């Protein structure tokens, strides 16, 4: 897979792509990640990429031309173009799986007060990571990148993500490690019983219990 990230602040991504699973995925040629500063595509003599909005209002708006030119310089027939925006469809594990099957993702990071609406004409999906507003699309782009890359074949063991939260509208079950007792808190007996069917039953019960407590909306979808 190839991921191109269009941003005004490429330095924000340098640590995350040089760390842990994403770094190993790049080294093992599972993914290629490119950082593109779309300011370089500005034709303004001062390299501006924003301007005042028509109709009045506070804040500057990203102009369409630099983003159009940046996208056109890298877009292919199989490219999936994603604009990070608080107004978009909410990112989910299902979308992460869908994106992981693509061969080329282009992530556009919005910034300032917003973007010229005409930019949406070259976008396949407008995407949000939740119902809140951030200063820009860089952090949401990192979330999407991380969520997708870990699902690529050979990046992590398939079993690790097949049994994770959200795959079947249930949260994950509780997990424990050594020591068996810590400050009076003991590992549940069933987990050290060696009885696999009882362990599976306990885990399912705990998944339902945790989902009911923290995310009852997921149980409604499951039903």
Image: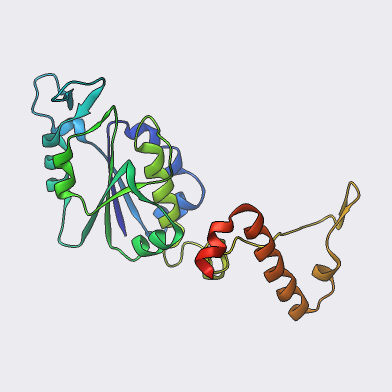
Where is the C terminus found, in terms of image quarters?
A: bottom right
> Can you say whether 175 is above or below 131 in the image?
below
**Which residue sits at x=80%, y=79%?**
195
- Residue placed at 21% from the left, 28% from the top? 61
- The answer to whether residue 221 is left or right of residue 199 is left
Residue situated in front as seen by the camera: 57 or 179:
57
Image location (x, y in percent) of residue 21:
49, 52
Image coordinates of residue 205 in percent, x first then y, are 71, 69
- Where's the N terminus, which quadrant? bottom left
**Vertical relation: 69 (above or below) 164:** above
The residue depicted at 13 percent of the width and 19 percent of the height is 46
Is residue 112 in view?
Answer: yes
Q: Pick whichever, 69 or 23, lies toward us.
A: 69
Rendered location of residue 167, percent (x, y): 51, 66
Q: Is residue 73 left or right of residue 186?
A: left
Q: Quadrant of residue 100?
A: bottom left
**Spot occupied by residue 137 in the image (x, y as percentages of width and height):** 34, 37
Residue at horizontal 62 percent and vertical 59 percent from the top: 211
Q: Residue 200 sits in which quadrant? A: bottom right
- Residue 70 appears in the rendering: no
The residue closer to the viewer here, 99 or 168, is 168
């Amino acid at each position: 897979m190839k991921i191109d990230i269009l941003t005004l602040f490429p330095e924000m991504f340098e640590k995350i792509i040089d760390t842990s699973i994403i770094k190993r995925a790049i080294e093992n040629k599972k993914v290629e990640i490119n950082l593109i500063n779309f300011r370089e595509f500005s034709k303004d003599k001062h390299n501006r990429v924003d301007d005042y909005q028509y109709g009045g209002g506070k804040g500057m708006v990203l102009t369409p031309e630099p983003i159009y030119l940046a996208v056109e310089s890298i877009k292919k027939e199989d490219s999936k173009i994603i604009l990070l925006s608080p107004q978009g469809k909410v990112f989910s594990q299902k979308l992460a799986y869908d994106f992981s099957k693509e061969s080329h993702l282009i992530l556009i990071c919005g910034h300032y007060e917003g973007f010229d609406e005409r930019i949406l004409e070259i976008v396949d999906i407008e995407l949000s990571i939740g119902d809140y507003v951030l200063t820009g699309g860089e952090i949401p782009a990192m979330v999407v990148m991380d969520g997708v890359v870990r699902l690529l074949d050979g990046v992590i063991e398939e079993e690790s993500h097949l049994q994770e939260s959200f795959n079947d509208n249930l949260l994950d079950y509780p997990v424990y490690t050594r020591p068996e007792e810590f400050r009076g808190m003991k590992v549940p007996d069933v987990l050290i019983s060696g009885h696999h069917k009882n362990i599976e039953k306990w885990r399912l019960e705990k998944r339902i219990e945790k989902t009911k407590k923290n995310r009852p909306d997921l149980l409604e979808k499951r039903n």
